[in-house]
Amino acid sequence: MKDSMTLADAFQNCKYPVVGHGKRNVRVLLESLEGTDGDTASDMYGKGDTIERFEAKMAAYLGKPEAVFFPSGTMAQQIALRIHCDETGKRKVAYHPLSHLELYEEDGLKALHRIETVLLADRDRLIRPEDVRDLEDDAACLLLELPQREIGGQLPPYAELEEISAYCRSRGIRLHLDGARLFEILPHYEKSAAEICALFDSAYVSFYKGLGGVAGAILAGEPALTERSKVWKRRHGGDLISLYPYVISSDYYFDKRIGKMAQYYEEAMALAEMYNGCADTIRTVPAVPASNMFHVHADVSKEALESILAGVAEETGVGLSAWVKALDDGGSGFEATIGDRYAAVPEDRLRSAFS
Amino acid sequence: MKDSMTLADAFQNCKYPVVGHGKRNVRVLLESLEGTDGDTASDMYGKGDTIERFEAKMAAYLGKPEAVFFPSGTMAQQIALRIHCDETGKRKVAYHPLSHLELYEEDGLKALHRIETVLLADRDRLIRPEDVRDLEDDAACLLLELPQREIGGQLPPYAELEEISAYCRSRGIRLHLDGARLFEILPHYEKSAAEICALFDSAYVSFYKGLGGVAGAILAGEPALTERSKVWKRRHGGDLISLYPYVISSDYYFDKRIGKMAQYYEEAMALAEMYNGCADTIRTVPAVPASNMFHVHADVSKEALESILAGVAEETGVGLSAWVKALDDGGSGFEATIGDRYAAVPEDRLRSAFS
């Protein structure tokens, strides 16, 4: 490996990238538009055939009466939590310390909606029923992220989900699903999206993670919530005159990949097994993936792991990750997410990367 | 005319629609993507060549140090006003009673940002320098919309703009430009966008009015403001992983139509003259357009005007408007906005519609 070749470059130029669907480029949009007639009318501020049909399709899929398309999950989830607060007359919501809202949204929930937050559970484990029983009466809503992305996509046993849901209902605490990767966990639970969503009062799903779309989100729930969410969408500046570039591409990639989630899941389990078998200093979190994703932890420095991965890419053509981050324990790690690319990697090539 | 044919249908089916660029359909996006290489990388949460290059281009065009692309003007403007409030330590902004923020944004500015508003001027006239001198010291910012869309796109004399700007600077009141139709007024003022924006501390422009793009907005100003605006964009849920469908189309239609604003303006003046000459009961507001748009007021009921316009469309093939609204004075009216379609209407056909 040339000293000047970074891991990002090595991944970018390797013959067999293992993670993801492909490059995020304009072709992703172009492919999704190929079958679309140019005469198809734009949506107009949330109204129109294309957007309403897709909302109805997703409402049916998620088993909720109504669904509303949003440009982003950040917007959809803040709004869902705001409505749960307004409807219950409370100003507090609870979520995991590594929730997307806590890490990546610049405290929008607090700055825009003045909602207080309660961080449930420790950073490195899932929220359990006993954590939820510790919630005070002033909590309007609990947000559960399934799977919990920042700890490798871990999932609670389904019975625990049911227990949390029943408890929240008994106490009048609303339950919201951060389903950014909901489609990806269906094979593990062996449940339909509607069965899982039935445990929740509202659910958000995303179209550019496992589905690999351009952008976009759906918020589903009761009509009282979805109708109010449209008013807040307008207030947030998300009620665009035309959302069809995201709607059409979301619909296209939903149809294209929703049936492949079991395949990605199995491939993730196979790949995790290779990581766990290759060296004592390397392990996956969780040990057995619960979706198409997992994290890889190594007992070596960030720089050392970058060098190893760049070397593998150069010697075998196999790109395992484009980046590595330092971990608090002195080790390092990265995220692996399985998409369409995995199946295109010859098995002997992949094995050679781990030998 | 068949009784069952509504004005909307008659306009939809007429041979010569007079207003607008064309139908808002998927072809608008497809056309803008024709010259784009599929390998072009997506922007990633506001970063990347395509978005940054367009922001730099618009910053230069508007004569401001920095510019940030937003999915909507609703989002961009609330954020600009919020930052002006935070930077001045005040919680009040002033704008026209028929401002977009007052009419179409479900009070997002108040609900999300807790900003108080002062409505300057009467509903049916422009804000004048004397209105601005009435502002109290607790106003952080004055928003001026150029042209004032809801009163037919009226514009103040340029000297009044300069006077308002100088007064605001002398009093420490920030001045923000709602330039949703800024491109459209340049021929009237015979000024560059940069010259006009120099009177303002921040400016927003839109890409789907006169330019006819898909959606999208730019907020331009000093780096202190634009950098903060990116944080608020994240909070609002507008910092999408991919905004390129809007960025590419905005750039395309800017290049395609920015040079046609003088033509649209002249055509608007010619069309307004026809309205003002055709009957005593019909007049335009303003009497002489200041941009590519004006309003038409008639001393007849909404139903009567709808019937007249539908009849014109059926008899002459000329579609003057797709809708009519009732006015407070018992009369009725509609908006006329000139775009690419006007030049395709044969002059004799157009004359026949007014005879």
Image (tube, coloured by chain):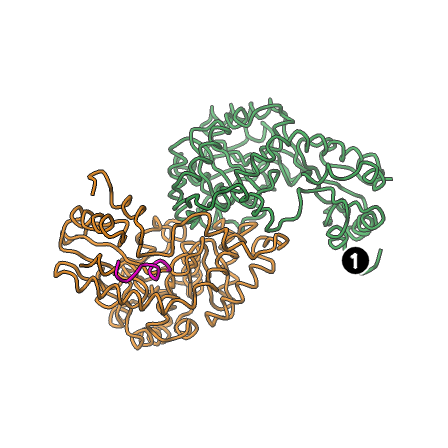
Chain colours: A orange, B green
Measuring from the top left, give residue A49's x and y in whole percent. Answer: 60, 60
- For the point 50% across and 51% down, the residue is A30
Which region shows up in magenta? Answer: A340-349
A267 to B256, vertically: above or below: below
Q: Is residue A213 left or right of residue A139?
A: right
A143 and B208: which is toward the camera: B208
On the rendered image, what quadrant is the N terminus of chain B found in?
bottom right
Q: Is residue A237 left or right of residue A316?
A: right
Q: Is residue A347 magenta?
A: yes
On the rendered image, what quadrant is the C terminus of chain B found in?
top right
| Amino acid on which disc 1 is placed | Met
- State the SS at label 1: loop
| Tag 1 residue | B5
Q: Is residue A353 magenta?
A: no
- For the point 76% across and 35% down, the residue is B271
Measuring from the top left, give residue A302's x and y in whole percent. Answer: 18, 48
Q: Is residue B116 left or right of residue A296?
A: right
- For the point 24% across and 41% down, the residue is A5
Measuring from the top left, give residue B57's x and y in whole percent. Answer: 47, 32
Q: Is residue B168 left or right of residue B354?
A: left
Q: Chain of mark 1?
A: B
A146 to B7, vertically: above or below: below
B126 and A152: which is toward the camera: A152
Residue found farthest to the right: B355
Measuring from the top left, give residue B167's x and y in whole percent. Answer: 51, 24
Q: Quadrant of residue A16?
A: bottom left
- For the point 34% across and 50% down, the residue is A107
